[in-house]
Amino acid sequence: MAGLATAFGSGSMTNSIDEFLVSDVILATGTNTTENHPVISTKIKQAVVHNGAKLIVVDPRNIELTKFATLYLSPIPGTDVAWINGMMNIIIEEGLLDKKYIEERTENFEEMAKVVKKYTPEFVEGITGIPKNLLIDAARLYAKAKVASIVYAMGITQHTTGTDNVKSLANLAMLCGNVGKEGGGVNPLRGQANVQGACDLGALPNVYTGYQPVTNEEIRKKFEEAWKPLNPLPNKVGLTLTEMVDAIVSKKVKGVFLIGENPMLSDPDSTHVEKAIKELEFIAVSDIFLSETAKLADVVFPAVTIAEKDGTFTNTERRVQRVRKAIPPVGEAKPDWEIVSLLSTKMGYKMDYKDPEEIFEEIRTVTPSYYGITYKRIDEMDGIQWPCPSLDHPGTKYLHKDKFARGKGLFSAIEFIKPAELPDDEYPFILSTGRVLFHYHTATMTRRSKGINEYYPKGYVEINPVDAEKLGVKDEDLVKVKSRRGEIQINASVTDRSPIGTIFIPFHFYEAKANILTNPALDPIAKIPEYKVCAVQVERVEE
């Protein structure tokens, strides 16, 4: 997360994927790893089955990974800060913390400890529903490990308290001295291919490449000298995608250029998003297929697929890798960099790069963490993990080995705050959204794959058997799910994967758009919407 850039690598894994194999304990929370990150889940399973690692899974849903878990904790959605504070309370009270590490490498411990003091196992059970004995067992298992790794994904970040959740996990890791050692760390699993690379190279509203702040005058001047823009570069933080939607409605944003993004399906409160897009004076979309959003565009630029492009991708463990063109571009499609370069030149700022390598050379000269990475070195080393500050540097397997990027690791004193919208008499269920193994994000690609689409052709709403019986709903029945923002009809999947009082809908399917329902309330720091908790009602649709 961008708010933690200086301390925890801007949402990148502090450690490497293979290091799960040397972890004694792995704490996985807010990550349905087997369906969203199947390659990484294989490593976690391997660590458990072959290397004897202990796995703690903390997730409201009974996901497949729980089959490999030593301990499984199922909290009420949106209560992460409470159970993390509870684990820290136990660790401190029982003297299981790493005092030497805390003293030498961290600061603000006393303030954090003061806050977590009231988060006793009994107090936490009342908030989260996690039995106190299970919480105690989990705290002891994590704290007593020689080295323990934390793995998380969007089940932690997609909340109005997402930043608090991440900081709390950082607190837990530092409390036991698990940051800056092989097999440990705090490891967010990135949600899409090359999303790490996109963030690294400045596709965020508050930073240039390598997380260099746009508000820093010295850095801004460096980029002006490198790029020689027609006008001075702005020194103000821009808008996130979700904020842009509101800015469109208020007429502050009048035109949009979308690259490989499908907010008609992926953004919360989809009805509001569609209204905003239709109010734009101009919208251009660059994509490989005519997505739901592209259908509303004034201009569509046909982009190439991964098979038709050269360049680099940076994966979730910060590894910069080469992508090589397998076939020439089909039809009139062009690589992203060519589309942007041609458009920029037409608008008066000439971009005449000859190939992606020339662009990468420019990137590394203005990005300290990428400076030592070249195409030649990537080929020789099978990819390089940043930070790589010099041409003789081997890359960095894990971060914060001797000290934190900010000097000392900062403990944060964080109180539990409830989600923005909770169930009530009118809307008695909690809805959480996510993905399934067979489809990718808004399914712009995967639903065009015949085999995949035949296996998983439509969306379902998971309903616990106890709730289904009360509602008179059977498996495959059509139900109506309604929130304060809209309603959809979708078939029921009666299963105990989702706990009583909670339903789950994958967001891939346009015919049953889960994001018509979701709450656009944002985390105040990271500006991430609360996809994982909103209040809904469910009823059977009569034939």
Image: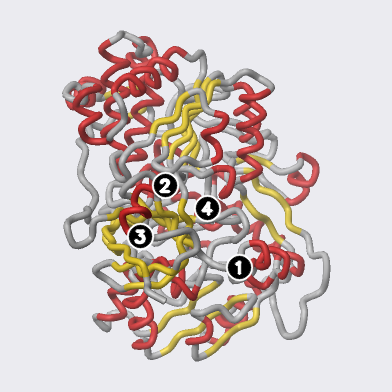
The span from disc 1 to disc 2 (Cα, nearest Å) is 21 Å
Mark 4: amino acid? Gly
Residue flagged by tag 3: what amino acid is it? Answer: Gly
Q: Can you give x and y, in whole percent of width and height, for residue 29 in the image? A: 44, 37
| First of labels 1, 2 by sequence position | 1
Q: What element carries label 2?
A: loop
Q: Nearer the viewer, residue 303 or 381?
A: 303
Of pointers 1 and 4, the one earlier in the residue sequence: 4
Task: Report the residue at 28% width, 63% height from top.
Answer: 537
Q: In this view, does 306 lie above or below 196?
A: below
Q: Kindly identify which numbered label has been placed on residue 472.
A: 3
Q: What residue type is labelled 2?
A: Ser
The span from disc 4 to disc 2 (Cα, nearest Å) is 22 Å
Quadrant where the C terminus is found in the figure: bottom left
Q: Where is residue 386, by image quadrant?
A: top right
Number of numbered labels in the structure image: 4
| Callout 1 crowding tier (Cα within 10 Å): few <14, some 14–19, many ≥20 | some
Residue 457 badge: 1
Is residue 223 visible to us here? no
Residue at disc 4, secondary structure: loop
Residue identifier under label 2: 498
Nearest-to-viewer mark from 3 and 4: 3
Q: Mark 4 points at which residue?
A: 191
Residue 148: percent from left, percent from top:
50, 22
> Residue drawn 66% across and 56% down?
361
- Which label sits in the foreground, 1 or 4? 1
| Residue 358 in view, yes or no | yes
Q: Which amino acid does label 1 sit on?
A: Pro
Q: How is the image coloured?
A: secondary structure
